Image (spheres, rainbow, N blue to C red):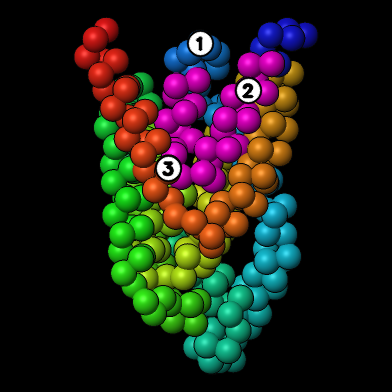
Amino acid sequence: MDITQILIGIIIGTVQGLTEFLPVSSSAHLVFMHEITGFAPNLAFDTVLHIGSLVAVVGYFWKDVVQMLKSFFSSLMDITRGNFKKGINEDKFKKLTWFIIIGTIPAGLAGVFFKDFFESLFSDITAVGFFLLITGFLLWGSERVSKRTENKSSLKEMTVKNSLLIGIAQACAIAPGISRSGATISTGLFLGLERELAARYSFLLSIPAILGAALVQVKDISTGLDINTGAFIAGFIAAAISGYLAIKFMLKLIKERDLLPFAYYCWIVGAFVLIWTLII
């Protein structure tokens, strides 16, 4: 067992877990880590780390996830009884569940029809730097709008249009450098959602997205495990633990402070990457 690879797996897993839920783009940081370490420049290892993040978000919102599953099957019964609309209006978990489903559609379509395009961006470090700058502007702009919005929308006022627009933001975040959490939370703030709701919806929306990506890569994951079992397992555990802590931190942060420090971080890193590509 290669201890060096295991340590690298832990480091990259920790970076993935933190940056998956902090609005700084986990995909961009994975590209950077692969460039720096030269380790696992493939989607299989990245997907294992994302599964670790999936465990983190499901673990943190376990009660909500269970309730949403119950609400989903209950709402299917409502359809057969002709009470679907009434059930959605009366049960917040039914509404949240279907908004998660609706919000997942754009990313699913983008992943199917633009898979090759998005994958090509992972080898373009210049594109990663450019997209990080965009993430910074999204965070900065959404905070300015949020501070001017006095009457923010709760889940009760949230609409299908809101969930679709946030879903489109998540689809764009398949590109490395566009932070998934940053894009979705920012879009929620632009739309006038309550700050905690924007973050909570963003994190719950990641569950089907990460799960879908993992299912696509199942074959590659099994092959990678045969080659780098220790590194894959270590990275998975590190991503799960750090991801859980990142979610807890973000939910507290978004209620008490703003996201501007992350915008500045994205600008600095994005600018550095672009300058670096020009130099070399």
Seen from the viewer's position, the closer of residues 278 and 264 is 264
Q: How much space separates mark 2 and mark 3, taking CA atoms?
A: 21 Å
Seen from the viewer's position, the closer of residues 246 and 47 is 246
The residue that disc 3 covers is 262
Which SS does the magenta portion mostly show?
Answer: helix
Q: Amino acid at mark 1?
A: Gly
Numbered range of the magenta stretch: 7-33
Q: Is residue 87 left or right of residue 133?
A: right
Q: Nearer the viewer, mark 2 or mark 3?
A: 3
Local secondary structure at mark 1: loop
Q: Residue furthest front?
A: 257
The residue that disc 1 covers is 38
Q: Is residue 49 magenta?
A: no
Q: In which quadrant will I find the C terminus?
A: top left
Q: Amino acid at mark 2?
A: Ile
Local secondary structure at mark 2: helix
